[in-house]
Every structure is written in structure tokens, then in C-alpha cells.
């Protein structure tokens, strides 16, 4: 790394001793090598620190920092960005693996569009065996003008499910100008950030799968259904919709109504999934959340699901029957 590297790579990590080495090696093996790698460890209780410090000893580009306590995902990412010294900042996730051309392709994309706030790319999702099971490849143009990405993310196709994941390369100045990641939005603070940045600046999309997303751990906060994050997601999209349609009060109301309809359907599906798969604690939590909501449908589900939950708990043997019926409904008897 030179004294004035054009690129800072921010790798946030927490409790990833088993996989973080793979991620770091794929970063250090980039065909564009003039960067600093800032590793921000969110007080991992496992061997993550030892692994990262060994890479720092071997490669002068690596700078390792450990938070004294866990400050949450947004706080950890903000800490890494604040330590970045370069005008371009790549936010990368521990556990992923990156094509050797990732940083170069992202840097070229922002160089070709000097007014763009950030760039992102397609990704391949891998199963437990490491085989490609799907590609995250939204049908976007190379350049999305100001507000265009926000409009697409608020469309029924993408609403409540962001087509931009947390791995991007952004201009440090754009972060500083628009504010860093909001702790209120927890693990999905990045979703709010992408929409906020696009409200005033273009975004560049690299139509290549340059990132491999490995099968996630079962205890990730978003690995199944997380009702707190479900509510956070709704608020993120409502705030973005309000910003997009302001000051038209009618359009703002319509935008919120559309988001609530989509949310109601998704929450109803999540409740059904918890019931079918025997996730009774999550089902109980979801029913409580629905009973407190102002949606008539969710209130009905919240109260109507109580006796069903009681029956499932009273007769645990029903799980086999429910699984059989679920299999039949999906076209594959168990």
C-alpha cells in the first residue's frame, strides 16, 4: 500500500473465526492491490481476533481494530468508515468471497461515473455444499439516476426486500455529506443508506457476479424470521416513501398504504411458515406483534392464531401431521 492509497476496504466482522480467513485472502488477492484493509472486529468472543492479527502481521495493508464492546452492526461499520483515509470506501462482509477483479471493476465503474455515490454488483448465492443455488441479479441498467433506485426499491417487486446488499463501494464524501449508518435501523441500516444516497446522486450497477455469498449460519439475526427486523424494515421503506413523495400528502399516504399491504401479506406468510415448521416461540412472538398492530388483518391473525398455538403446544405430535400436509400442499409428499 502506498502512503496515499486511493481505496479503503472496510471489513466488518463478528464471531467468524471459521470463515474470516477465506474472506481476507480473497481481498488481499485482488488484481488491484493499492488499498488499505481496515478490519473492524465487533468484540468477537471466538478466535477471530487472532486470525485477523496474523494477517496484519503478514501484510502491511491490513489494519486491525477491535471494539471493547459490541456496538451493533451500524456502529461497527461507522467506526470502520471513520478510520478510512481514501476517497473510495468498499464495505465488505466477513464470510463472503470476492472475485479477484471486484475492487478494480468497482473502481472503474465509479471512475466512469464521477457523480455517482456508490456502485454495487450481482452476487451468487451458494448452498451448504458450496454450489451456486441462485444469483442476485436485479434487472437494472448500468446507471440509475437520482431517485431512480429509490423508486425501484419501493416498487412491489423489490419493496421490503432490498436488491442492494451491504457490499458496495461508495465515495467517502457521500457518506460524510449524508450522514453515516443509522443505529435505529439495526442490521438493515444499509438499506436505508442506499436509498438516502440515491435521493441526490446517481448509482452505478456492475452487471457481473463478483461476490459469492456462502450459506449463512443458522443463528444470524435474519436467518429465519426476526420480528424486530421486520418492523424496522417497514419503517425504513415508509420513511423512504415519504421522502420520495414529499410534499404531496396524498402520494405519501398511497405509498404507505402500498407498503403496509405488502407487509401484511409477508407477515401472514411468515406466521404460516412458523406454524408449519414448528417454530412456536417465533410464532408466539409474531402473534403478539400482530395483535399490537393497527392493521385489521394482522389483528385478526394475532388473536385467531392463539388457539392454534395452544393446540400445537398441547399436542407436539401434531408436527408430523402438519409437515406431511405441508409436503402434500407443495407437491411432494414426505
Image: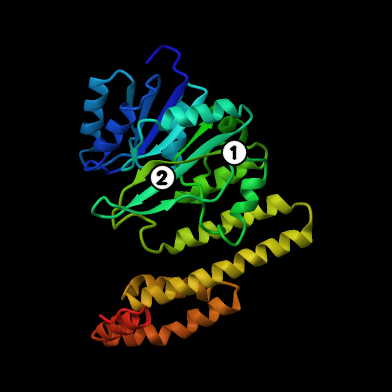
Q: Residue beneath label 1, please?
A: 203
Residue 100: percent from left, percent from top: 35, 31
Q: Residue furthest top?
A: 3
Q: Is residue 171 visible?
A: no
Q: Coloured how?
A: rainbow
Query: Quick check: 216 left or right of 106?
Result: left
* Distance CA(mark 1)–CA(mark 2): 27 Å
Q: Residues within 10 Å of mark 1 (few under 14, many from 20)?
A: many
Q: Residue beneath label 2, please?
A: 72
Residue 312 sits in which quadrant? bottom left
Q: Which mark is residue 52?
A: none
Residue at horizontal 60 percent and vertical 74 percent from the top: 295
Q: Residues within 10 Å of mark 2 (few under 14, many from 20)?
A: some
Q: Earlier in the sequence, mark 1 or mark 2?
A: 2
Q: Is residue 19 visible?
A: yes
What quarter of the picture does the C terminus occupy? bottom left
Residue 256: percent from left, percent from top: 66, 63
Q: Are marks 1 and 2 in contact (CB under 8 Å)?
A: no
What quarter of the picture does the N terminus occupy? top left
Looking at the rendered image, the disc whose residue lies closer to the viewer, 1 or 2, is 1
| The one of 320 and 239 positioned closer to us in this rendering | 320
- Against 299, is 136 above or below? above
Residue 173 sits in which quadrant? top right
Residue at horizontal 40 percent and vertical 87 percent from the top: 307
Residue at horizontal 70 percent and vertical 50 percent from the top: 244
Residue at horizontal 33 percent and vertical 30 percent from the top: 27
- Against 59, is 113 above or below? below
- Against 319, is 137 above or below? above
Looking at the rendered structure, the secondary structure element under dot 1 is: strand
| The one of 10 and 207 positioned closer to us in this rendering | 207
Amino acid at each position: 500500500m502506498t502512503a496515499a492509497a486511493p481505496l479503503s476496504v472496510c471489513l466488518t466482522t463478528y464471531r467468524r473465526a471459521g470463515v474470516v480467513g477465506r474472506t481476507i485472502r480473497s481481498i488481499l488477492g485482488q488484481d488491484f492491490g493499492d488499498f488499505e484493509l481496515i478490519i473492524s472486529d465487533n468484540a468477537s468472543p471466538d478466535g477471530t481476533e487472532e486470525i485477523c492479527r496474523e494477517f496484519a502481521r503478514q501484510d502491511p495493508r491490513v489494519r486491525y481494530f477491535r471494539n471493547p464492546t459490541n456496538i451493533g452492526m451500524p456502529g461497527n461499520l461507522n467506526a470502520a468508515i471513520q478510520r478510512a483515509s481514501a476517497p473510495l470506501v468498499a464495505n465488505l462482509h466477513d464470510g463472503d468471497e470476492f472475485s479477484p477483479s471486484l475492487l478494480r471493476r468497482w473502481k472503474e465503474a465509479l471512475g466512469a461515473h464521477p457523480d455517482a455515490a456508490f456502485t454495487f454488483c450481482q452476487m451468487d448465492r451458494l448452498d451448504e455444499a458450496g454450489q451456486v443455488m441462485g444469483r442476485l441479479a436485479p434487472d437494472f441498467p448500468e446507471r440509475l439516476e437520482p431517485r431512480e433506485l429509490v423508486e425501484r426499491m419501493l416498487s412491489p417487486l423489490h419493496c421490503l426486500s432490498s436488491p442492494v446488499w451491504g457490499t458496495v463501494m461508495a465515495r467517502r464524501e457521500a457518506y460524510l455529506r449524508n450522514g453515516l449508518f443509522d443505529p435505529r435501523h439495526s442490521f438493515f441500516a444499509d438499506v436505508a443508506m442506499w436509498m438516502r444516497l440515491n435521493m441526490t446522486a446517481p448509482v452505478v450497477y456492475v452487471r457481473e457476479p463478483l461476490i459469492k455469498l456462502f450459506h449463512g449460519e443458522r443463528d444470524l439475526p435474519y436467518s429465519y424470521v426476526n420480528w424486530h427486523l421486520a418492523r424496522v424494515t417497514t419503517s425504513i421503506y415508509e420513511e423512504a416513501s415519504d421522502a420520495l413523495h414529499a410534499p404531496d400528502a396524498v402520494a405519501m399516504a398511497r405509498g404507505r398504504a402500498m407498503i403496509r399491504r405488502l407487509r401484511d401479506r409477508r407477515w401472514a406468510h411468515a406466521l404460516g411458515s412458523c406454524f408449519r415448521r414448528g417454530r412456536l416461540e417465533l410464532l408466539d412472538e409474531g402473534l403478539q406483534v400482530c395483535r399490537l398492530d393497527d392493521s385489521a388483518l394482522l389483528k385478526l391473525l394475532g388473536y385467531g392464531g392463539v388457539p392454534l398455538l395452544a393446540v400445537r403446544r398441547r399436542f407436539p405430535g401434531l408436527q408430523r401431521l402438519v409437515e406431511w400436509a405441508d409436503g402434500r400442499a407443495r407437491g411432494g409428499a414426505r
